[in-house]
Image (cartoon, rainbow, N blue to C red):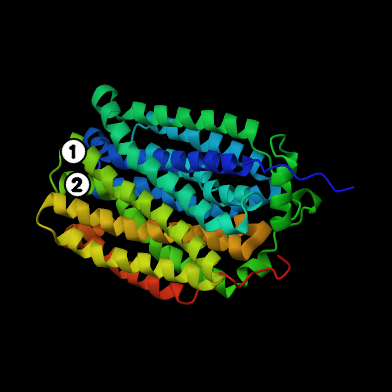
Amino acid sequence: MDSLPIARPTLVRHKVLWLTVAAYMITYMDRVVIATAAPYIREEFGFSLATMGLIIAAFRWSYAAFQIPGGWFGDRFGPRRALTIIVTWWSLFTSATALSWNAASMIVFRFLFGVGEAGAFPVATRSLSRWMLPRERGWAQGVTHAGSRLGGAITPLLVVPLIADFGWRWAFVSFGALGLVWAAVWYWYYRDAPSDHSGVNAGELSLIHSALGDARTRTRKSVPWRAILSSSTLWTLCAMYFCYAYCLALYLDWLPTYLKESRGFDLKRMGLYASLPLFAGMLGDLAGGWISDLWAKRTGNLKMARRAVAILGFLMAAIFIVPAALAADPLASVWYTCLALFGLEITVGVSWAIPLDIGGDYAGSVSAVMNTCGNIGGAISSTALAYLVAWNGWNVPFFVSCVFSLMAAALFLRIDATKKIFDGE
């Protein structure tokens, strides 16, 4: 007797992906809100640019310091519980920022906020490692990071009316509440193994198991840090991501302030024009991951598919950062910045697909190491900006970012996505 045909696969893994995209959106909404509110926080408290830099950098230092513990937490206890806990944590401290009464209190709240957000990307990457097929990884990482940039892009548009009507504190309270809602939905819907999800049918389960194996049959082991930290590919990836995050922090943390103080935009126009480059970055996220996966599928050359797309993106960023800084017309500066962010973000889906490519079941810990190094770069960028501006004006930070983009392109020549950390994966 012929066996019964397997039912057409369900698409629960795609619903899991879109729920993860929502988490990425919230991470950037909660971190970009302070960039939009910064000019008004400075006005209320009388903070200097350097003091505001320390407040913004407090998040980035804790975010960098707790990446590896956050990745370990997700690998050890599973993404379902881990993401529920950490999103709840950072959402509470997002809202708590509204309680700040001086620079020291705001630094503490932003530091604790960063402790929670530190686990977001590593654990979210781990949450997809047992669900997304290998051929979908670049696209999945591109979509998730596009979601984060979309969150960052719409934040100024949402925060500006809140500030105008209710003051900057209510913006933090509102955004924190959104994260608490997401955490409840995640715990209700997500499962660490596809075979544990009631919505996954035999067809989808067969598709996932044929590509990835059955996660339930794998025994839980301690994270093999010696093997991870011995990977030369990982350390090159870390150096590249340091350069990338240095550049990105300039735009995420300081673009609204730059547009207001250097380019003369008022509150309403600042909100609009601070959003446009992040919308362009969102398109870059989508394009980079999709092109890389398509290239790999058609040629079978994963190494070149990851490498070439990322190098192209970094070179494009370097080319357009300089005219964005030098343009006499403020609107021309915004449009050049859009092109620079589009190029910079082409690299992101590729960069985050590589921990999945080389790390397997320990992708959370691998990506945590990468993101630690990246956010050290971001913390240095946020702290250094005030001193670079004081030294020789607003153009200098952008010129430095151009150099870092070129360095990242050169480093990607040494990154091999086919060089797995664990031979058995």
Q: Secondary structure at mark 2?
A: helix
Residue 77 vs residue 334: left or right? right
In the rendered image, which residue does mark 2 sit on?
259
Farthest right residue in view? 1
Q: Residues within 10 Å of mark 1 (few under 14, many from 20)?
A: some
Q: For the residues marked 2 and 1, what is the alpha-carbon distance in whole angstroms?
A: 9 Å
Residue displayed at 46% across by 69% down: 239
Say if 284 sits above or below 32 in the image: below
In which quadrant of the rendered image does the C terminus lie?
bottom right
Camera-side residue of 230 and 331: 331
Mark 2: few, some, or many residues within 10 Å (few <14, many ≥20)? many
Which residue reaches farthest top? 165
In the rendered image, residue 324, in percent from the top left (x then y), is placed at 19, 58
Of the numbered discs 2 and 1, the one sitting upstream in the chain is 2
Is residue 192 shown left or right of residue 233?
Answer: right
Q: Position of residue 357 (x, y in %)?
A: 59, 63
Looking at the rendered structure, the secondary structure element under dot 1 is helix
In-image side of 216 versus 160 (left or right): right
The quadrant in which residue 111 appears is top left
Tell me if I can see residue 208 in this picture.
yes
Q: Position of residue 55 (x, y in %)?
A: 35, 45
| Residue located at (42% from left, 41% from top) | 110
Residue 292, placed above or below residue 267: below
* Residue receiving disc 1: 269
Question: Is residue 233 or residue 394 the one in the foreground?
Answer: 233
Residue 48 appears in the picture as rendered:
no
As shown in the figure, which amino acid type bears the numbered disc 1?
Arg
Q: Do the residues under discs 2 and 1 have CB atoms within 8 angstroms?
A: yes
